[in-house]
Amino acid sequence: MFEKPETTAEAPIEIARYAVFGQPIAHSRSPAIHRMFAQAEHVALRYDAIEASPAEFPRKLAQFAADGGRGANITLPLKSAAHVACRTHGAHAQRSGVANTVTRRDDGTWHGDNTDGLGLVADIAERHRLDLRGRRTLVLGAGGAAQAVLSALLEAGVESIVIANRTPERADALADRIGEPSRVHTAYWDALRDAGAFDFVLNATSAGHAGSALDLPFSLFAPRALAYDMNYGKAAIGFTAWARAGEAGHVVDGLGMLVEQAAESFRIWHGRRPDTEPVYQQLRRETAA
Ligand code: NDP
């Protein structure tokens, strides 16, 4: 994408290195997104996809640093390991215990942030122009993605959050970690039929990747409710079809969140937030094709 920079005998120009770590990683859109941002913002960088298991991650992150790596995005299943690898943390990473963005400091240590929640809120509030304030919220799932976004949702002013997870103990552990018992509660998945209606239903499960249906009642949707699936592409088909059938007022998939969380990472590394709309439109065309 960038011309190879000219070098002189005295001072070869080094291109800053960035990467996304995960397993599997070949499918990741992060390299394409960051290269598009960099081109638009005239930032020279190299951005790779690096496969690593949780056991391999510390060694591969250290190798990346030794090779000049300055920052990395972190995806499944490494977000907890990334949090552990960081000496210091931003507020959302601190509160959630998972990091999706790591930045190398001058002293060689790593700083961890989590931009998933800010990305979700930016997509809802700015792209879709929906106000989160006062919404009674249901979060389906209690994995890394749910963990990452709760603090940003609370900050954005949702009234309350009910977490329901297939494995209820994980929902309880997540609610305990957030530590806001007046606003964050849990419910058994099977009891959702009696849980009333919600203004915002967030699918943070990975069920769609396996094509599994969630088997939930339409009574979960209050009038004009927002149904948001963090998944996108084929993995979002089941939940979004269910939400449309249940006449949710707004039905949104997670493609915008993906682009917005990447823009937040870009801002952390390069000091400015790129225009996300052209990249979002490009990815939307690609996922529709
Ligand atoms: P995890 O593996 O950490 O958690 C998966 C969650 O899904 C768990 O709560 C799990 O429940 C639940 N689950 C899986 N299968 C089923 C099922 N058949 N029925 C009900 N619940 C199920 O994944 P993450 O939390 O990291 O990611 C969740 C999803 O969000 C992924 O699909 C990921 O691609 C997407 N995501 C999107 C982002 C974006 O930018 N748009 C950012 C981050 C994630 P249990 O605990 O019982 O196993």
Image (cartoon, grey):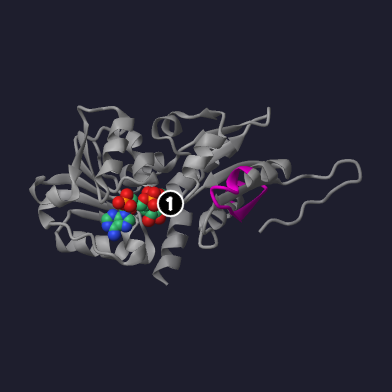
Q: Is 221 above or below relative to 58?
A: below
Q: Is residue 179 above or below residue 248?
A: above
* Placement of the C terminus among the 4 image quadrants: bottom left
* Quadrant (top left/top right/bottom left/bottom right) for the N terminus: bottom right
Query: How many numbered marks have been drawn onto this rendered protein structure?
Result: 1
* Residue type at the position of mark 1: Leu
Locate residue 188, reporting x and y percent: 18, 46
- Magenta segment: does it hold 44? yes
Residue 13's quadrant in the figure? Answer: top right
Is residue 119 positioned above or below 2 on the image? above
Judging depth in this view, the residue of 279 and 193 nearest the camera is 193
Horizontal side, residue 85 vs residue 250: left or right:
right
Magenta span contains residue 214: no
Place of residue 72 in the rendered image (x, y in percent of width and height, measured from the top left): 58, 44
Crowd class of label 1 (few under 14; some 14 to 19; many from 20; radius 10 Å): many
Q: Is mark 1 within 8 Å of ligand 1?
A: yes
Q: Nearer the viewer, residue 244 or 40?
A: 244
Q: Nearer the viewer, residue 11 or 81?
A: 81
Q: Which residue is mark 1?
A: 258
Taking the spot 57% from the left edge, 47% from the top edge, the residue there is: 55
Image coordinates for residue 182, horizontal then vertical, percent: 20, 27
The reply to whether residue 116 is visible in this rendering is: yes
Q: Residue at x 32, y 37 (%)?
A: 150
Dot 1 lies on which element? helix
Residue 152 location, x and y as percent?
35, 35
Name the foreground residue: 208 vs 37.
Answer: 208
| Left-right relation of 223 to 201 | left
Q: Which residues are magenta?
A: 40-58
Seen in the image, is 33 located left or right of residue 237?
Answer: right
Q: Residue furthest right?
A: 9
Q: Can residue 272 be spotted in the picture?
A: no
